Amino acid sequence: MEETKEQSAEEKKKELYERQKELLDTFLAHHAITKAQYDKSLGDLTVKMGFAAGKQE
């Protein structure tokens, strides 16, 4: 049972990461942030959420 809870928590974490990434994508598309700001924010988000840079979609 613990494995299922942990998996669920990981899935929620992944969903949060994806939502945050989509928000950054929207900001960039609407020129609310620069490409440099996008790259920095996405890199920071990736590190803080514990996802390897190679796993980004």
Image: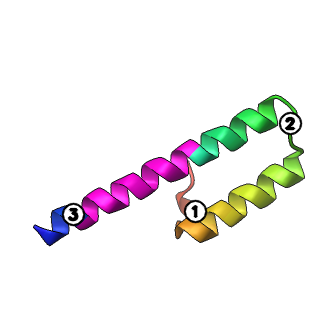
Q: Amino acid at mark 1?
A: Gly
Which quadrant: the N terminus? bottom left
Q: CA distance from mark 2 to mark 1?
A: 26 Å
Residue 48 image-quadrant placement: bottom right
Q: Is residue 20 left or right of residue 29?
A: left
Q: CA distance from mark 3 to mark 2?
A: 38 Å
Residue 42 image-quadrant placement: bottom right
Residue picked out by circle 1: 54
Locate residue 30, reporting x and y percent. Answer: 82, 28
Q: Amino acid at mark 3?
A: Lys
Residue 13 is one of the magenta-drawn residues: yes
Locate residue 54, reporting x and y percent. Answer: 57, 62
Residue picked out by circle 2: 32
Q: Amino acid at mark 2?
A: Ala
The residue under the point 78% across, 55% down is 39
Asked whether 18 or 9 is in front, the reply is 9
Region rendered in magenta: 6-19
The residue under the point 86% across, 42% down is 33
Of mark 2 and mark 1, the one earlier in the sequence is 2
Q: Classify mark 1: helix, strand or loop.
A: helix
Of mark 3 and mark 2, the one earlier in the sequence is 3
Depth check, mark 2 against mark 1: the one in front is: 2
Residue 5 position (above or below residue 29): below
CB atoms of marks 1 and 3 within 8 Å:
no
Of mark 1 and mark 3, the one earlier in the sequence is 3
Q: Is residue 9 left or right of residue 30?
A: left
Residue picked out by circle 3: 5
